[in-house]
Image: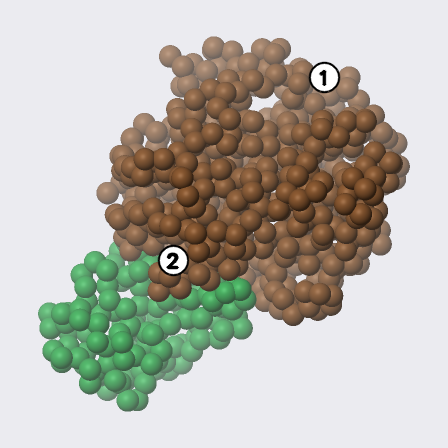
Amino acid sequence: MVHGYAGFLLFIDLTTGKVERRELRENIRNMFIGGKGFVAKLLYDLLPPNTDPFSPENPLIFAAGPLNGTIPPFGNKNIVGGKSPLTGLYMDSYFSGGFGAELKFAGYDALVIKGRSQRPVYIIIDDNETKILDATHVWGKTTYETYNILKKDHGDPTVKVVCIGPAGENMVRFACIDADIHRQAGRCGGGAIMGSKNLKAIVVRGSGEIEVAQVDKLIDLAKEFSEVLRKTPDASGYSEYGTSIAVSYANVEGLWPYKNWQDQVYDEAVNEYSGEEQKKRVWIKDRSGYGCTMLCEKVAMITRGPFAGKVVHGAEYETVAMLGANCGFSNLNALLQANLLCDLLGIDTISMGAVASFAMECYERGILTREDLGGLDLKFGNYDALNKLIEMVAYRKGIGKILAEGVRIASQKIGKGSEHYAIEIKGLETPAWGVRGAPAMALQYVTVDRGGCHQRGWPIVYETAGTGPEGQKIERLSTEGKAACCKWDQDYTSAMGTLIQCDLTRFGVDPSYFTRALSYAIGYEVTFKDFMVIGERIWNLIRLINLREGLTREMEEKLPTRFMEEPLPSGPAKGHYMSKEELRKMLNEYYRIRGWDDKGEPRKEKLVELGLER
Amino acid sequence: MQLIFHVDRCSGCHSCELICSVYKNGKIGPRRARIRIVTPEPGIHSFAEFCIQCANSPCVKSCPRNALIKSATGIICVDEEACIGCGLCMNVCPVNAIKIDPKNKKALICDLCKGKPKCVEFCPTKALEFMT
């Protein structure tokens, strides 16, 4: 057995029903480590250029990393990838839970699903036995119902399941994949890819074992790291108040969205959505991800409204900001109801919040009429209308049919200047971190591999702290030195994606813990320098995929026009916006530092240096 | 000697399963662990399944090969040579504590790690406690 790995990949073709086990080659392990690296490499090799994301040829890839199923309290996230229905480019999305670990215990480091079944099916992987089974009885069911039924069907409550809800079945382009227990691979529309394959769920049970090279050292490191986490202010904050601890920070720094990004400050909502407030009013339980010692997962009980008494996992910062603040309302129970609806129907709360606030602004500006909306009075702040809209999107009813395409396509269809209110990058709706007062973050947004995203690099912390990743001094509103911050953070985050490390465990923590854990697991030393090269290699390989899929600098590497033209009305960066000129300057510098030409294509020397070309 | 489980503290992280299996077998494989975490929908609380050394010990009585031996302290020891993995003990256990090892097909029962249970040492929320 190979230390840290199961050693095999599983290929399933839903058109032919063929199931094939292939060995995980040594050079793939060494060059790409796992997780994001495997997804990038497999997609580069398997995706025929210009494939429609809903074509049977689009491979849906689930991958684990060398730390999945092992002891340290990081590196147990899971990753799913393919060609995104929203962006038409490379996508990956991370999610919590024991799916990747279970996949390894069943004997596989990654799972590649191609083809399309004639009728609804689900896959069961039970160690070395894989079956494709009829899913008629769960088709149309919500995610919660699907878990219940499938776990009962298999008579084992400990199997790990990922599934889609009705939104995925209806190929809503921002449908998510739900992973038990109610965590989501939210972004980029993986759920829609499953739907296009007529694949409702994947059930895994693994009874095998993983062997790591230096188990005692790995256990000691895990213990030590847990102590570090307990003492690190960021991590202990997440344990106490979840990701919603960020609410007050985002408001004070003027970073979170209000009314489709018309502002980035929303004082009234802080005392409704903050982690402190949620803890006091609705959280009934703290939970952890698989193998994790942090308690960042919160379970809430809805206490008012039509969903009173129901349970929802959340609400996370991104959800309160995008579905709540961005839709212009400050009401915790109404927000939790919208959160639960999205989870049940299988919709990404970030994109849903962006789509709803886009429609609200179009309505208030007369671009969409009440008639267009099927009688819905979709003013900002009308959360009852929001909850109706979520169902219309999931079932593609009325205006939901257009909105289910995401803001980019929807705004193109609606026209009438609505494009200005479509807040997306590369087709992916931006998450709840404004960039008008944060140039490095703006550059990060336009260059990130999967479109508008805050999780593939997080240079905003350097800007608010004033110190760069390598100790250099930086100024928040200046564009100076920002390209370097951005590149460093992308390479680091990309390398962390191989592990598949949780974002929340990295802040304020010595990075050597991660490389040491990796080395103990796989049995040879990976230095921090090696690690960063691996990250850069993956980032460049994904760049090649995206260029092959037609990404161009002019078309794709830009901010929503609102961020480039409308000055911020309030907050510490009041009056500021990211001008095209500033962005162009930073982008040029970024390409240069990356070793890319002025069109953003990696130069041959860079590809040779990274071992991607001979 | 007994393990005590505090359901209100358990975060459902499964660390106990991972550490149990690695301590007993040198490799990580939670389905060979002697403790198991189960989380019913909608995923609020998680419950641990392990031997509670109950007084009546139906497992011992059910074994057709007399492979389960109860020690003076109440711990059930499995005579692996005698055990044929028939699963009768598993079926009669009142708390679902017994599993059949998927690898060697013998009964898996918590033996409290000679009085120093690793799961207790490792549990990040102190949901598992050891009472001597």
Residue A584: mark in rendering? 1
Give the quadrant of residue B48.
Answer: bottom left
The C terminus of chain A lies in which quarter of the figure?
top left
Q: Position of residue A237 (x, y in %)?
A: 64, 56
Q: Chain of mark 1?
A: A
Is A205 situated above or below B69?
A: above
**How far is disc 2 from disc 1 in space, using C-alphas?**
50 Å
Q: Vertical placement of A337 versus A427: above or below?
A: below
**How far across and how far down the image is residue A458, in percent?**
63, 36
Specify the subunit that label 2 lies on: A
Q: Of A451 and B111, which appears nearest the observer?
A: A451
The residue under label 2 is: A159
**SS class of the residue under badge 2?**
loop
Query: Which image quadrant for residue A373?
Result: top right
Q: Nearer the viewer, mark 2 or mark 1?
A: 2
Q: Amino acid at mark 1?
A: Arg
B25 or A366: nearer the eye? A366
- Local crowd size for mark 1, using a 10 Å CA cut-off: few (<14), some (14–19), many (≥20): some
- The answer to whether A608 appears left or right of A563 in the picture is left
In the picture, which chain is brown? A
How is colour applied across the structure in the image?
Answer: by chain
List x then y, in percent, for residue A461: 68, 39
The colour applied to the residues of chain B in this rendering is green
Q: Identify the residue shown where x is 85% and y is 29%.
A: A566
Q: Is residue A446 visible?
A: yes
Q: Are marks 2 and 1 in contact (CB under 8 Å)?
A: no
